[in-house]
């Protein structure tokens, strides 16, 4: 049984861990063991170079992960199995490249990268515990103090957040009404204390607005939050677009659907205006619901009289990252730094998905699709184009006043939400903290991008060639400079020796010829450069030495040349005779 200290430590770690910071595979190597081959995967979390670790897997584990992710219908390349020769170096090299491509493809798909199985595969230390059993225990503990609620059926993996768990529940007082329960723990941006959080949940439960789906009950037990809402048979806007049942697995629902449901332009405009009205109401009351996306917009009513209602408003209060969290860290969105800007950008992504009946799957819109309705094209461009995200984005009020959405008639109904002034100050603190964290992460990403760009420039082939040429040029310049700087180090071998005052020995011509002949008969075992030539025979009477003509010297070494010349032409006969007066004897 774990101690109380370890439980609190684990809770603290989960509270501030951001599960949705993108992971990437930095390197993939292999090592051959006697009975099998292991593949070592180096993983990095976000732009922080200190958060790196190695994970060891066999090919069978890669294959099992591929089999699980195949249910999404997304094409994932993986090397084929080998019955024989799996330890050959060529096979291992090809398989290593294929597994690297497989992981890169998985991590580029947010739907796949955010699954528990992928997180556990790349970080088994952090994601070792099974989350569903712990969530069910917490829900059971919550219902002990609220016996009017009971769990009817657990519904697993129907949403993109793997730490958010879903259950069908019933109220004993109203058995005919079906309710949907969500259980989740606070996220990395959670800043409220327990008392303020309970106040916020009570406020959310008391919201009355036709375009906001407020919770029936919200309970916080110190570990997580259990939120109950009425069950909608049509599901979310995401379910309507993908034409799927709400209770299906998230990979089967939102992978590659069999058939899209195309929304007409009137429905897109109507849903957009209803969503904007709900967002405006929350902003006016001090809430910043930066969690808007197709998954938390619930569609209610029939096909002819359907309305869109915003759900899961508590996500921002609990500090959960937004659906487009991974895009906010990209270099293109470095100017999106406030929660209002994040809200406008998220609405742009939602509008694109409604208009095109498919997600953008990119941080910005490079080009406007040709099949986009002309009525919606200017609005989408003002929210998602490359030039638009570099400037302040349109606010919610600006979008409501847009001529496209202003034509929708809205029935004025009762609206209710009273927020105390003290709690508004706490909401402002939470907003400021989330913005500071977002800007800090964006700064890290930009710094890492500069470092990667510099490394690529250094390691590129063209840069290598330039560096080789520059090194050769520097070496040649150093050689030339060394020769010019030291001109007097080269000594001429043909210069005659200095004149000696001693008389030259007399040699007969016969003895000289005999010695010369004997020297010519000696076999040369080494190169001729290694054996010096015999000196020429001196003349009987040495003529006076000719004047030494030194090699022309540079101007900078003229004094040194004059000194060497005077040394070569020095003669003792030019010295004056001196008389020595010896005074060393003793005096008597």
Image: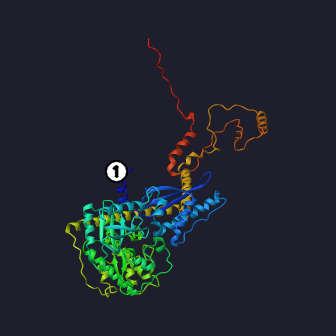
Q: Which residue is mark 1?
A: 4
Residue 375 visible in rendering: no
Residue 250 position in % (x across, y down)? 45, 71
In this rendering, the answer to whether 519 lies above or below 489 is: above
Q: Is residue 374 left or right of residue 552?
A: left
Tell me what residue is drawn at x 62 percent, y 52 percent. Answer: 35
In-front residue for pair 204/374: 204
In-front residue for pair 254/281: 254
Residue 50 position in % (x across, y down)? 43, 55
Residue 522 position in % (x across, y down)? 78, 38
Question: Which quadrant would the C terminus be assigned to in this image?
Answer: top left
Residue 81 position in % (x across, y down)? 62, 63
In this rendering, the answer to whether 379 lies above or below 105 is: below
Total tally of numbered discs in the picture:
1
Q: Quadrant of residue 287?
A: bottom left
Crowd tier of the residue under label 1, counting other residues whose Cα lies within 10 Å: few below 14, some 14–19, many 20 or above: few
Residue 97 visible in rendering: yes
- Outermost residue toward the left? 421
Tell me what residue is drawn at x 21 percent, y 73 percent. Answer: 418
Q: Quadrant of residue 319?
A: bottom left
């Amino acid at each position: 049984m774990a101690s109380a200290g370890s439980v609190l430590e684990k809770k603290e770690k989960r509270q501030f861990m951001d599960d949705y910071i993108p992971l990437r595979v930095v390197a993939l190597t292999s090592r051959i063991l006697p009975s099998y081959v292991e593949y070592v995967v180096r993983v990095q979390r976000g732009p922080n170079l200190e958060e790196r670790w190695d994970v060891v897997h066999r090919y069978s584990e890669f294959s099992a992960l591929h089999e699980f992710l195949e249910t999404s219908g997304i094409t994932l390349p993986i090397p084929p199995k080998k019955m024989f020769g799996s330890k050959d170096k060529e096979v291992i090299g090809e398989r290593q490249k294929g597994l690297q491509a497989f992981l890169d493809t998985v991590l580029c798909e947010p739907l796949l990268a955010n699954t528990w199985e992928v997180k556990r595969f790349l970080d088994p230390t952090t994601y070792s515990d099974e989350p569903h059993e712990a969530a069910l225990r917490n829900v059971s503990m919550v219902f002990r103090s609220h016996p009017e609620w009971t769990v009817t059926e657990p519904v697993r993996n129907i949403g993109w957040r793997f730490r958010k768990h879903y259950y069908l529940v019933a109220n004993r007082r109203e058995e005919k009404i079906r309710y949907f329960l969500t259980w989740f723990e606070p996220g990395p941006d959670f800043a409220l204390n327990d008392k303020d959080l309970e106040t916020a949940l009570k406020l959310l439960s008391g919201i009355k607005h036709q375009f906001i789906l407020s919770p029936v009950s919200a309970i916080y037990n110190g570990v997580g939050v259990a939120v109950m809402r009425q069950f909608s048979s049509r599901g979310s806007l995401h379910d309507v677009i993908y034409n799927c049942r709400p209770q299906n697995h998230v990979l089967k629902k939102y992978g590659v659907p069999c058939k899209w449901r195309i929304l007409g332009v009137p429905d897109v405009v109507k849903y957009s205006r209803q969503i904007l009205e709900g967002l405006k109401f929350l902003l006016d009351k001090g809430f910043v619901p930066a969690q808007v996306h197709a998954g938390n917009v619930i569609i209610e009513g029939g096909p002819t009289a359907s309305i869109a209602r915003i759900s899961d408003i508590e996500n921002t209060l609990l500090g959960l990252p937004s659906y487009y969290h991974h895009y906010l860290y990209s270099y293109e969105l470095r100017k999106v730094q406030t929660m209002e800007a994040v809200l406008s950008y998220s609405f742009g992504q939602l509008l694109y998905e409604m208009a095109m009946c498919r997600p953008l799957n990119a941080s910005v819109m490079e080009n406007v699709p040709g099949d986009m309705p002309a009525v919606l094209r200017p609005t989408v461009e003002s929210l998602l184009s490359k030039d638009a995200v570099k400037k302040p984005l349109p606010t919610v009020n600006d979008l409501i006043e847009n001529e496209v959405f202003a034509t929708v008639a809205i029935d004025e109904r009762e609206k209710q939400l009273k927020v105390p002034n003290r709690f508004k100050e706490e909401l402002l603190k939470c907003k400021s903290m989330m913005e500071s964290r977002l800007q800090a992460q964006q700064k890290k990403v930009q710094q890492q991008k500069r470092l990667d760009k510099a490394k690529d420039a250094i390691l590129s082939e063209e840069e290598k060639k330039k560096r080789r040429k520059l090194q050769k040029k520097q070496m040649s310049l150093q050689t030339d400079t060394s020769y010019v700087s030291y001109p007097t180090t080269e000594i001429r071998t043909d210069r005659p020796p200095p004149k000696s005052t001693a008389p030259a020995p007399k040699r007969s011509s016969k003895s000289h010829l005999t010695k010369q002949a004997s020297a010519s008969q000696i076999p040369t075992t080494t190169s001729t450069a290694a054996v010096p030539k015999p000196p020429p025979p001196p003349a009987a009477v040495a003529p006076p030495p000719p004047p030494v003509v030194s090699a022309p010297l540079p101007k900078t070494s003229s004094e040194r040349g004059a000194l060497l010349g005077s040394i070569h032409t020095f003669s003792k006969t030019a010295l004056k005779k001196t008389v020595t007066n010896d005074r060393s004897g003793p005096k008597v």
